[in-house]
């Protein structure tokens, strides 16, 4: 069966003060219908930029898809018109953004904002759209939905606003839901509730989910496959269990070593947590013909600085772009 979404050799370029920078460099992955995959990596690695490219929301005039394909249900979105992209956004592919307070309009009630999505994409009248908004708020477990539908965003807590964003994203029963750091700034109890909600909604609707996060612990609990990104490139990808148990890339090993329960599960002891030294390189270094993780890697050699590492394929679908991945 053909994948629902297929990204092939994607390259995204941004205009910067220092010239053109490839913020996404030769990225490829697939998403099957009903599947949950996760993008993981530090801030600035290109996770959100990938999501914006899929949605056709790259920054106007400074961002562009330089090469590659984004094929959704057989259609190349990189060649689609803006009108076609507007038809797809919010209808067939929806996105939950990081901060609901800046994504929701403060001068409209949450019910009006959910109903607007239904009127625009489903052609519903005002009353049916309003009733559907109440049902959606109830589905995302907001108590007293019939009353809260008339609330403004400032009258809701952070967790409730995020639930409103989820209701809006799911209003048209999309085939793909992109969740970009959906629990940013929420406390751990509310985070757990949001992820439980996403799991339940996925089981009920069959929607495919792309989860963007920097938390390997969340990935271990939520996704079936994962893509580890670093400096705009795919460092490693494959089944979650396989990567967590046997990370092939030094960057992936660094990420897993930062999560207490993953470290304990792997060692059966209360192992000491470690950190990845250094920071993600600046945009001016993106695109260099070398391993961009070399400056932070304890295993790097001159070969890593001289040429970009090839992608090594392992049994079970695991892939890692590292010169020494076979030696792990």
Image (spheres, grey):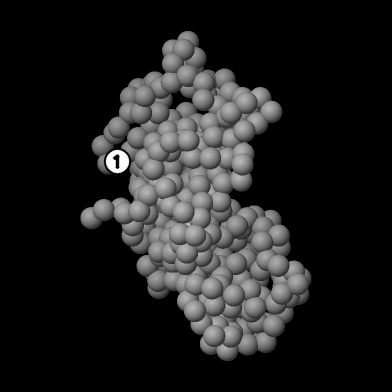
Q: Can residue 158 be seen at all in this image of the molecule?
A: no
Q: Is residue 64 or residue 259 the one in the foreground?
A: 64
Quadrant assignment for the N terminus: bottom left
Tell me: residue 261, above or below residue 119.
above
Which residue: 61% across, 41% down?
61
Which residue: 33% across, 24% down?
326
Give x and y (percent) for residue 162.
62, 66
Q: Can residue 73 be seen at all in this image of the molecule?
A: yes
Give x and y (percent) for residue 121.
49, 72
Which residue: 53% across, 76% down?
118
Tell me: residue 255, above or below residue 182.
above
103 displayed left or right of 291: right
| SS for dot 1 | helix
Which residue: 47% across, 50% down?
54
323 displayed left or right of 305: left
Residue at the disc numbered 1: 317
């Amino acid at each position: 069966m053909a994948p629902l979404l297929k990204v092939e050799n994607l390259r995204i370029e941004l205009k910067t003060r220092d010239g053109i920078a490839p913020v996404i460099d030769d990225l490829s992955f697939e998403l099957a219908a009903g599947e949950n995959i996760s993008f993981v990596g530090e801030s600035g690695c290109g996770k959100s930029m990938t999501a914006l490219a899929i949605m056709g929301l790259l920054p106007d005039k400074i961002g562009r898809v330089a090469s590659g394909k984004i094929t959704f249900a057989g259609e190349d979105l990189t060649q689609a018109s803006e009108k076609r992209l507007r038809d797809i956004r919010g209808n067939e592919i929806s996105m939950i953004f990081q901060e609901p307070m800046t994504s929701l309009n403060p001068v409209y009630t949450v019910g009006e904002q959910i109903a607007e999505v239904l009127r625009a994409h489903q052609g519903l009248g005002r009353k049916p759209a309003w009733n559907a908004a109440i049902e959606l708020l109830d589905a995302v477990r907001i108590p007293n939905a019939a009353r809260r539908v008339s609330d403004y965003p400032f009258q809701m807590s952070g967790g409730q606003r995020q639930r409103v964003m989820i209701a809006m994203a799911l209003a048209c029963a999309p085939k793909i839901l992109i969740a970009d750091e959906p629990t940013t700034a929420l406390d751990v109890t509310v985070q757990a509730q949001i992820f439980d909600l996403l799991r339940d909604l996925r089981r009920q609707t069959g929607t495919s989910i792309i989860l963007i996060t920097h938390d390997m612990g969340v990935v271990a609990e939520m996704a079936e496959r994962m893509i580890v990104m670093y400096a705009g490139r795919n460092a490693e990808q494959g089944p979650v269990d396989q990567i967590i148990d046997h990370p092939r890339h030094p960057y992936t090993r660094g990420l897993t070593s930062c999560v207490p329960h993953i470290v304990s599960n792997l060692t059966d002891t209360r192992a000491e947590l470690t950190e990845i030294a250094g920071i993600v390189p600046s945009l001016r270094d993106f695109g260099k013909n070398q391993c961009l993780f070399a400056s932070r890697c304890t295993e790097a050699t001159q070969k890593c600085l001289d040429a970009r590492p090839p992608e090594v394929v392992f049994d079970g679908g695991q892939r890692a772009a590292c010169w020494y991945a076979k030696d792990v």
